[in-house]
Image (cartoon, rainbow, N blue to C red):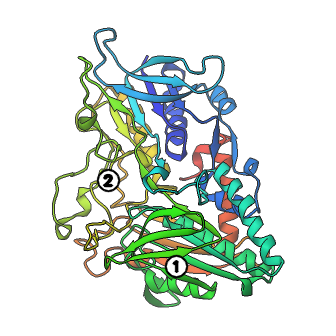
Amino acid sequence: MAKVVVLGAGVSGHTAALVAKRKLGKQHEVVIISPNSNYQWVPSNIWVGVGLMKPDQVKFKLAPVYKKQGIVYKQALALSIHPEGNKNNEKGFVTIKYVAGENEGKEETVDFDFLINATGPKLNFAATEGLGPDKFTNSVCTYDHAAHAWENLQKSLEKMEKGEKQTFLIGTGHPLATCQGAAFEYALNISFEVNKRKLNHLADIWWISNEYELGDFGMGGAYIKRNGYITPTKIFTESILKEYGIRWIKRAGVKKIDAGKAYYETLDGTEHEKEFDFAMLIPGFAGAGMKAFDKNDDDITDKVFAANGMMKVDADYTPKPYEEWKASDWPKIYQNPVYDNMYASGIAFAPPHTMSKPMESPNGTKIFPTPPRTGMPSGVIGRVVAANVAHRIKTGKEDHPHEASMAKMGAACIVSAGYGLIKGQAAVMTVNPIVQDWEKYPKWGRNIKDTVGVVGSAGHWMKLFMHYMFLYKAKAKALWWIIPE
């Protein structure tokens, strides 16, 4: 019997565990280790953040799902990985610490034959002074954060209803933050809700971003087909913001937050301040912070993980100029290059480089988005990694019949622009591939036939449908596996 251990129960880890167990059956063991007791459908957190969904509508308990599927579930935090074992254990193992239940606080080791690291990101609020829901800004990164943001947003709405003007600052809260899409959605939804209440004359809504041009979204921007024309996402994004009455600040690296004030540097090296009454700023992401040790208990963290704490995989990490970056630099199977029984999926894998061109101010401050790997790519990578692990276990072969390079994978993104049965809107954008391939597509970087962008009520209905469809899939209901990532 082989044992597969999955770290993390987010989109990628949860998908990997379900797929691995379905393919391996009762003959092999699948263990999932996560400090979270709930699964959350993160894309819908923005609706929680404007009071249109409750946290219970975007989450569910993990334990019953795993029990039904025959997956061993440990609500614990992974502390360290020992891929070679040590003098007390010949097999590779992870050290974990329980965070709930009768074993809370207890540490133990869990051995593995194969390990899938899907721990997702550490929300690195601490990297920006004053940032975060326990400080001076709000977040929609988790359902708890989003619920807290809604509580604070209501206070601003109440003040506006009394005739008091309010300034909203939405965007990225670190010079290297990613997830611009989620923040962009939230800005549009706030504008939509303010307008619905006929309070827009009292609202001053600002978008602040580390993007060189709006519409970069950490993908280096894109060219999209819209109404028969080819349009850069810069124009696409700016036109939507203008339509919603949102002003913007770009090329900005937020460095510090005080009560009601953000301090940021722009790429030209100048320092600025922006006052606000309500702010929702996405933090920088980092790895989970696990350590790694060899059989002699010597620290090999730098061997297994990149400097950002994310696991090294089959990517080309050779330092080289931006002009020499290639689509082939990106990983295909997400296997650790040193320990072939370890994989990383979703945000847990270390990208070889960004998709956006690196930018630096005269003061040496790096200001540009890091690569997004959330949602659809995370789910696809989780499924492919699990399928390859199951293949290796069942056949005894070392090959990988399944691949999921982000430089060959297409993705669809639905950006909510307001919730409503009749007036709700969303911007639908597709790109193929996610990572630009300038050798294959020298003019646009991507296949322009597959790269489109439209805005309308159909997109809102599609996003709402996907909310229920993917929660159904995540709950492992009947025929869940036929629903694509």
Image spot of residue 423 (x, y percent): 76, 79
Q: Nearer the viewer, residue 180 or 254?
A: 254
Front: mark 1 or 2:
2
C-alpha distance separating marks 1 and 2: 26 Å
Dot 1 falls on a residue whose secondary structure is strand
Image spot of residue 5 (x, y percent): 45, 27
Residue sitting at x 21%, y 51%: 317
Mark 1 Cα shell of 10 Å, populated few (<14), some (14-19), many (≥20): many
422 versus 83 height, above or below: below
Q: Amino acid at mark 2?
A: Pro
Image spot of residue 419 (x, y percent): 73, 70
Which of the image's four quarters has the N terminus? Answer: top left
Mark 2 Cα shell of 10 Å, populated few (<14), some (14-19), many (≥20): many
**Residue that mark 1 sits on:** 453
User: Based on the displayed image, in which of its 4 quarters is residue 243 positioned?
Assistant: bottom right
94 versus 161 height, above or below: above
Q: Which mark is residue 429?
A: none
Q: Amino acid at mark 1?
A: Gly
Count of all numbered marks drawn on residues in the image: 2
Name the residue furthest right: 162
> In the drawing, does residue 44 fall left or right of residue 239?
right
Q: Nearer the viewer, residue 174 or 419?
A: 174
**Residue that mark 2 sits on:** 351
